Image (cartoon, coloured by chain):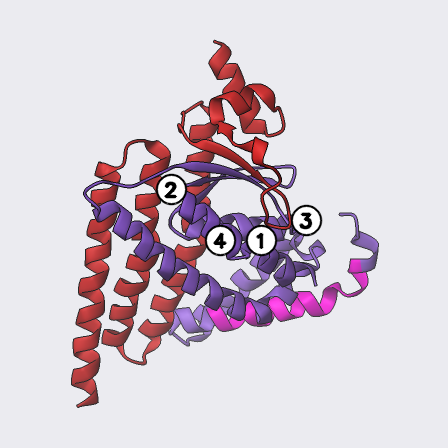
Amino acid sequence: MLEQVLYVLSWIMLTVGGFFVLVGGIGALRLPNFYTRMHAASVTDTIATFLVLGGLLLQAGLTIATVKLIAILVFLLLTGPTASYALANAALLSGVKSNATFRKVNGKGSKSGAGQETSVNQETDASQETSASQENNEEQSK
Amino acid sequence: MREEQSASQSKTPIILSWLVILAVVWLLWSGIYKPLVIGLGALSCLLTLYLSHRIGFFNESTSIHVIPRIMGYWWLLFVDIIKSSIDVTRIILDPKLPISPVEVELESAPKGPIGQAILGNSITLSPGTVTIDVYKGRMRIHCLTEESANDMIAGKVNERTAELTEK
């Protein structure tokens, strides 16, 4: 009885996981520019990974394969964002525009002022504080 | 590097506990318990320790104290990830595609390199927010919508990471 419940549950998790992979793919096609497309990819990276590997864990039962699956999960979650950061930072440094509004937040987590909301392109002219801003600025002056 | 003198006295127990962790992990992943294979495993554990020592891994006093506390942190992060995944999925499947990209510049609360790495990766991991630059303790974060930016700030991930690594 319990075995059947676990079996059904694992297939539900695998199916829902597959659905989120599909959503990630649809998002990567529908969203307008590079940075927003990265957000779609992170749906596939996180919730889809949880569900697919969770489903496989239920299929595997308590064996040494369980430990390996958990290790795969942990390493995917540790290395995924590192790769995303490398990709996003490379895009930023090579001057890919994001068309986003810019906002500064201080360490306490509240907005530091109403006058801070400007478009990114203006902000990079005004502020030299981040390395990438400088790079962007050079890119624009070319 | 800064605290090399004070850290060097308490290094041995840290190195030993890493050896235990590495050995347990290796035994679990190998699953084959023959003398040759175990010998190779022991060698690779020692080699890993030596290389970690060479890159100055054991000078960072935070690295091992974080491990017992990280489970609670991971749980909160997991809840955040599920919530924001569902939000992003809704946005992607909405025919109107209601996005409003925002870039947030956040003063990072953790000051050490490990804390900042954990913070940046946690933010990237939750869908809807991606860290695109870290420079002198400032994180530049691209958010898919205004709401995801507000959720990230209200979610106190910054403060939680500082608590995890620096207390």
Q: Which range of residues does the magenta coloring cover?
A: B7-25
Mark 2 to mark 4: distance in Å? 16 Å
Disc 2 marks which amino acid? Leu
> Label 3 amino acid?
Lys
Please tell me if label 4 and label 1 are on a single chain.
yes
Q: Earlier in the sequence, mark 1 or mark 2?
A: 2
Q: Residues within 10 Å of mark 2 (few under 14, many from 20)?
A: many
Reading the image, the residue beneath label 1 is: B158
For label 3, the residue is B111
Q: Residue at x 38, y 74 (%)?
A: B32
Density class for disc 1 (Cα within 10 Å; few <14, some 14-19, many ≥20) is many
Please report the residue visible at 45 percent of the width from the left and 32 percent of the height from the top. A101
Disc 4 to disc 1, how far (Cα)?
9 Å
Q: CA distance from mark 1 to mark 2?
A: 19 Å
Q: Colour of chain B?
A: purple
Label 4, residues with CA under 10 Å away: few <14, some 14-19, many ≥20? many
For mark 2, name the chain. Answer: B
Asked if residue B156 lies left or right of residue B4, the reply is: left
Say which amino acid is labelled 4. Ser
Q: Secondary structure at mark 4?
A: helix
Instruction: Say which residue label 4 marks.
Output: B122
Q: Colour of chain A?
A: red
In the image, are marks 1 and 3 on the same chain? yes
Give a yes or no on whether discs 1 and 2 share a subunit. Answer: yes
Locate residue A52, reporting x and y percent. Answer: 26, 63
On residue B144, which mark appears? 2
Image position of B151 with respect to B32: above or below: above
Q: Which chain letter goes with mark 1?
A: B
Q: CA distance from mark 4 to mark 3?
A: 16 Å
Q: Secondary structure at mark 2?
A: loop
Q: Chain of mark 3?
A: B
